[in-house]
Image (cartoon, rainbow, N blue to C red):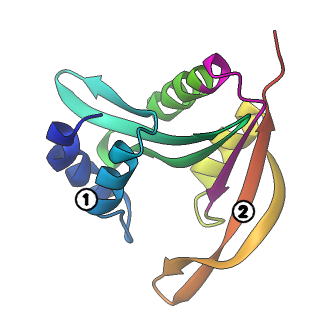
Amino acid sequence: MRDADLAEVMEVELRAYPFPWTPGIFRDCLRAQYPMWLLVDDGHIVGYAVLSLAVDEAHLLNLCVDPVCQGRGHGRRLLQAILGIARGHRIARVFLEARPSNPAALALYHDTGFNEIGRRPRYYPARQGREDAIVMALELLED
């Protein structure tokens, strides 16, 4: 992902989330040189992922597939690619937060081997107050 992609990324972000990231958050991640990958189909961005790396741990900050393209395996493909990047950086553990109200994401993460390790109370904004975050982790074992 590059600055030039942000307008199209924001279109997807706004379609996908009721409480989307701002362009500034994406720019901050670009400036920090986080691995940020796009999934492009027929010349259009259908998904993206943002990963933060620190020593031997990584944090999946955002994994998004355009709602009009969901259910086609794009999320799984993007997650596998970003985990490959983490392995390439010799990351031992990947963390993420997910909304309990997002069963498709939770199923994907569980299917990939992530386990729930805790909760962050009132972490996400929600239509009526706040929503907890399920904290998940995946141990990346050496092949």
Alpha-carbon distance for marks 2 and 1?
Answer: 25 Å
Q: Position of residue 55 (x, y in %)?
A: 70, 36
Instruction: Tell me what residue is drawn at x 36 percent, y 65 percent.
Output: 20
92 within the magenta span: yes
Instruction: Indicate the amino acid at tag 1.
Output: Pro
Give left or right: position of 32 versus 120: left
Instruction: Indicate the amino acid at tag 2.
Output: Ile
Residue 143, located in which quarter of the rendered image?
Answer: top right
Name the disc covering residue 45, or none.
none
The number of callouts visible is 2
Q: Position of residue 141 (x, y in %)?
A: 84, 21
State the SS at label 1.
helix
Residue 76 lies, with reference to residue 126, above or below; the image says above
Q: Earlier in the sequence, mark 2 or mark 1?
A: 1
Report whether residue 58 is seen. Answer: yes
Name the disc covering residue 23, or none.
1
